[in-house]
């Protein structure tokens, strides 16, 4: 019996050594991410690495576009935007100028601008963030991008507490943003329709609130300082819909309407030097498992969505396979 135990032990050691030597990591279940290299996001960041890899995968990839809309971009314009929101500013220029004139501090913060290498993580709202214990790891990234009204309060152990950018639209805005954001968090409006721009204008200029035209009533009172507000350049939505999801433009229209999360990935691969994602992916549509880490809504609601979820999954896998982005959880 002692000899048998010894033999088994030797076989086990050999298997471990083979596993280590192969250098292969699998992320097909909930436990794999806990032992992955992504537990150390402080790994070497190489300036321009994401850009060089993305250029090989994304047609007409370019970083020559401003991240946020700026007031000066609407003066002396020689050619107007071809598309309406969410893919362009056509038809919304006048309202945008009024908004940007009030919240005209649309620069990138100096503490981000001066980073030699931007390490970013896009934190999805997926159920796989629950009990992930990734909070401390997420807080180590230079830039933490969160989505919509995904809460931080009471979930810090799994999702962290740092928020650099929060991408949202009126229907997904917190009524009280202070609780789940940092004082310096930039609230980045992702305008899906012209009404979204009008909503932010009423907030900034304290005008009569808009109540009709939204699929869900947005906050009437929104306690965010104007210096913390940005409007995302619709260019990144256009890239997400056409270059990443592969939907063609027909008669000045684009069919696909990416989710906020997928659009945030599109933004990150045009802005960051290292892009990690966490909490992305949905269970099967007939699965009773919740889709968010913070509520009990099941995947069945996604069947009614106008978003191209299967196409987004394929696009994310392609970006992962080409190492444009890396996954901290599993997908």
Image (cartoon, rainbow, N blue to C red):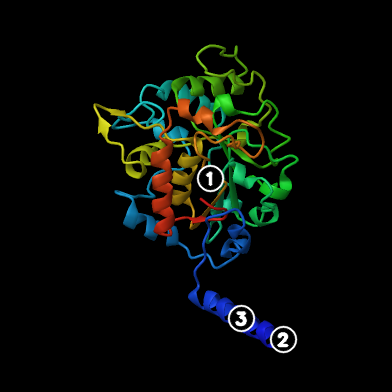
SS category of the residue bearing label 1: loop
- 248 vs 280, left or right, is left
Residue 70, numbered label: none
- From this view, report whether residue 195 is shown above or below residue 43: above
Identify the residue at horizontal 53%, vertical 38% (top origin). Answer: 106
- From this view, report whether residue 55 is shown above or below residue 227: below
Q: Which class describes the residues within 10 Å of circle 3: few (<14), some (14-19), or many (20+)?
A: few
Residue 213, horizontal then vertical, whole percent: 50, 14
Q: Earlier in the sequence, mark 1 or mark 2?
A: 2
Q: Quadrant of residue 85?
A: top left
Distance, label 1 to label 3, CA atoms, is 35 Å
Identify the residue at horizontal 36%, vertical 32% (top origin). Answer: 256
Identify the residue at horizontal 72%, vertical 46% (top origin). Answer: 156
SS category of the residue bearing label 3: helix
- 106 vs 53, left or right, is right
Asked whether disc 1 touches disc 3, contact meaning CB atoms under 8 Å apart, the reply is: no
Q: Earlier in the sequence, mark 3 or mark 2?
A: 2
Give the farthest residue toward the left. 251
Distance, label 3 to label 2, CA atoms, is 17 Å
Between 103 and 182, the one lying in front of the other is 182
Provide the residue designation for mark 2: 2
Q: Which class describes the residues within 10 Å of circle 2: few (<14), some (14-19), or many (20+)?
A: few
- 38 vs 154, left or right, is left
Residue 13, numbered label: 3
Q: Is residue 17 visible?
A: yes
Tell us which disc is closer to us: 3 or 2: 2
Residue 280, numbered label: 1
Tell us which disc is closer to us: 1 or 3: 3
Give the farthest residue toward the bottom. 3
Q: Earlier in the sequence, mark 1 or mark 3?
A: 3
Distance, label 1 to label 2, CA atoms, is 48 Å
Quadrant including the N terminus: bottom right
């Amino acid at each position: 019996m002692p000899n048998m135990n010894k033999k088994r032990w030797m076989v086990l050691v050999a298997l471990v050594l083979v596993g280590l030597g192969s250098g292969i990591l699998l992320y097909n279940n909930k436990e794999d991410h806990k032992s992955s290299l992504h537990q150390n996001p402080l790994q070497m960041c190489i300036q321009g690495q994401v850009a060089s890899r993305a250029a090989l995968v994304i047609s007409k990839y370019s970083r020559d576009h401003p991240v946020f809309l700026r007031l000066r971009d609407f003066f002396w314009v020689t050619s107007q935007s071809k598309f309406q929101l969410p893919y362009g500013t056509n038809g919304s220029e006048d309202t945008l100028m009024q908004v940007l004139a009030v919240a005209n501090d649309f620069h990138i913060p100096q503490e981000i601008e001066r980073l030699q290498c931007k390490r970013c993580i896009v934190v999805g709202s997926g159920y796989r963030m629950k009990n992930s214990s990734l909070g401390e790891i997420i807080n180590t990234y230079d830039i933490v991008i969160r989505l919509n009204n995904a809460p931080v309060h009471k979930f810090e152990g799994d999702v962290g507490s740092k928020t650099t950018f929060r991408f949202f639209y009126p229907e997904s805005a917190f009524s009280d943003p202070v609780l789940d954001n940092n004082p310096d968090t930039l609230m980045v409006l992702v305008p899906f329709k012209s009404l979204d721009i009008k909503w932010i204008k009423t907030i900034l200029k304290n005008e009569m609130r808009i109540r009709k035209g939204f699929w869900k009533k947005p906050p009437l009172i929104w306690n965010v300082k104007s210096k913390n507000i940005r409007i995302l350049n619709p260019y990144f939505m256009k890239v997400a819909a056409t270059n990443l999801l592969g939907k063609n433009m027909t008669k000045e229209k684009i069919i696909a309407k990416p989710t906020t999360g997928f659009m945030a990935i599109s933004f990150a691969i045009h802005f960051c030097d290292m892009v990690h994602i966490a909490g992305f992916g949905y269970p099967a549509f007939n699965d009773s498992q919740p889709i968010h880490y913070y509520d009990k809504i099941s995947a069945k609601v996604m069947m009614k969505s106008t978003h191209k979820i299967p196409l987004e999954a394929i696009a994310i896998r392609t970006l992962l396979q080409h190492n444009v982005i890396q996954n901290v959880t599993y997908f």
